[in-house]
Image (tube, rainbow, N blue to C red):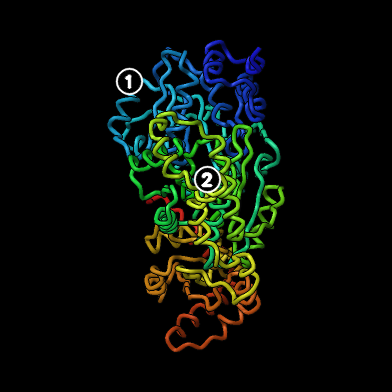
Amino acid sequence: MNAFQKLGLDADLLQAINDMGFETPSEVQDKSIPILLEQETDLVALAQTGTGKTAAFGFPLIQKLDPSSKKTQALILSPTRELCLQITNELKNYSKYKRSLNVVAVYGGASITEQARSIERGAQIIVATPGRMQDMIRRRLADISSIGYCVLDEADEMLNMGFYEDIKSILSHTPKEKKTWLFSATMPKEVAKIASKFMDNPVEITVGSKNKGTANVSHEYYLVNHRNRYDALKRLADANPDIFSVIFCRTKRDTQKVAEKLIEDGYNAAALHGDLSQNQRDLVMKSFRTRQIQMLVATDVAARGIDVDDITHVINYQLPDEIETYTHRSGRTGRAGKNGVSMVIISKSEVRKIRTIEKIIQQKFEQKEIPDGMEICKTQLFHLADDIRKTEINHEIDPYLPTINEALEDFTKEELIKKFFSVEFTRFFNYYQKAPDLSSESAGGRPEVSEGNTRYFINVGSKDGFDWMSLKDFLKAELNLGRDDVFKVDVKGSFSFFNTDEQHTDLILKTFSEFNHNGRFINVEVTKDQKSDKGGRRRERSGGRRNNSRNDDKKGENFKGRRRSDRSDKKGGRKGSRNKNIETSLKRRRSKA
């Protein structure tokens, strides 16, 4: 008997499950499905990426809906187009024997008119990205006023992408009595806020521990000098000849740059990021799934739709801004019961982040050395020998063998083997024979300065009502920058730090040269020390004294005004009011966006 029968699923679903070859439910499916089938309840399910969350909510959802009614009965929100399409395709496979059940994908980059027609013909389930769903509602092209179920898939990532206001607006058009099922890989405070605000006494299911990484993935980090990061990436690829990997970069610009370098150096690589059209993204993913691409370089947002079970390695070319995002990245490998490796290339200043990640995923990292050149040559040589051993003989060459034998008759067997292997080995040997030891170089040298980007100090922090997300939103709105253009946001008590590509430096300094926000002078400066940990401690010790004692001819009046404002805050209790104004202003900007 199929193990799924014990969960209470009906015959149509069991037949579809059997067709797909599923035999044993995953832990999140085993825990979620019986509850969702037997109870009318809200649910929060926390499970690592790649553990079968779509089936965990998809099976009970399909079984509970009425295929005879063409009304929209369920809405599933997901963060990206790729994930939206992935969920839609999986639900269609699950419901193949529910003849009248229709699932429609609603996402940007495709015809909204065509999507509206599909809904009008009858869509019991709409799978949508928040932005496009908002458009559909505004244009009255979709009616979700009588749905019975709403699923928030990858909730942490949707909030990380700034969709809180969109989700809030969309849910306002749904009935209060609906049931909400929230699925997430991690449980940051923003997800907990959604659960408390929009859900009624939800049942909580946790697979493993909150934010814990999957046990099938081993975690390694490699310490290198920043300028050797790309060379380290190439060595890790060469040391693993069968690598089939996703390489994560922080920005679209770095993603494109790394992919182009890899292609120039002869690797089967491609970039996946938000600047690609939907058609380009589809072509890249098709090539990746068929292994025409061996190394896919991606941003975190674009990678949300990657659903490939046999990825061998995840390589963190740069660590993410938000440490919790590492859980999503490493979840791309070690799927469907297979083992995987998550590698991190870091400089000395980032070692502390590894310790933080270890606490979140509750797993230890192993520090490893970047392979040296001769080690890579040896690995490639043995890999070639193994490939030859496994190769099936193509007898189409038989007619040419007499001529080949005649050309090679002067050589012994040993000489032929040496010549044959030298064809491949010499290429690697010539490249690596004088290559430096990248690991040993990282142990010394001057402090790292981020290449190609600039770090700034700004005189607002958590005391002004900011956290990293709201400060990032504030900066993006004021500077009209994209999501990836502001990163490494580090919020302290009365000040903060952030980074942008150096091309934005003039814009930022000009924008904040005499910037007044709700009566408060906001000052932004380029930090002299690009290392945020040392800079942060130095400013923490002297931040208050620095602002009150500074005499600058150009900004003196502004600083005087700020001191008067600070004194009046203490006397009249206006600080809380000022914080509220900033928060209100931020909400207004998000709403307009």
User: In the image, residue 454 lies at what x, y percent?
Assistant: 47, 70
> Which badge, 2 or 1, is on the more N-terminal residue?
1
Rendered position, 592 above or below 459: above
Q: Label 1 amino acid?
A: Arg
Q: Residue at x 71, y 47 (%)?
A: 362
Where is mark 2, residue-wise?
245
Q: Which residue is mark 1?
A: 121
Q: CA distance from mark 2 to mark 1?
A: 41 Å
Query: Observer-nearest residue: 134 or 271?
Result: 271
The N terminus lies in which quarter of the figure?
Answer: top right
Q: Are marks 2 and 1 in contact (CB under 8 Å)?
A: no
| Up/down of 167 relative to 59, above or below | below
Q: Amino acid at mark 2?
A: Ser
Q: Measured along the vertical axis of the image, is residue 170 above or below residue 9?
A: below
Q: Quadrant of residue 112?
A: top left
Most foreground residue, 256 or 427: 427
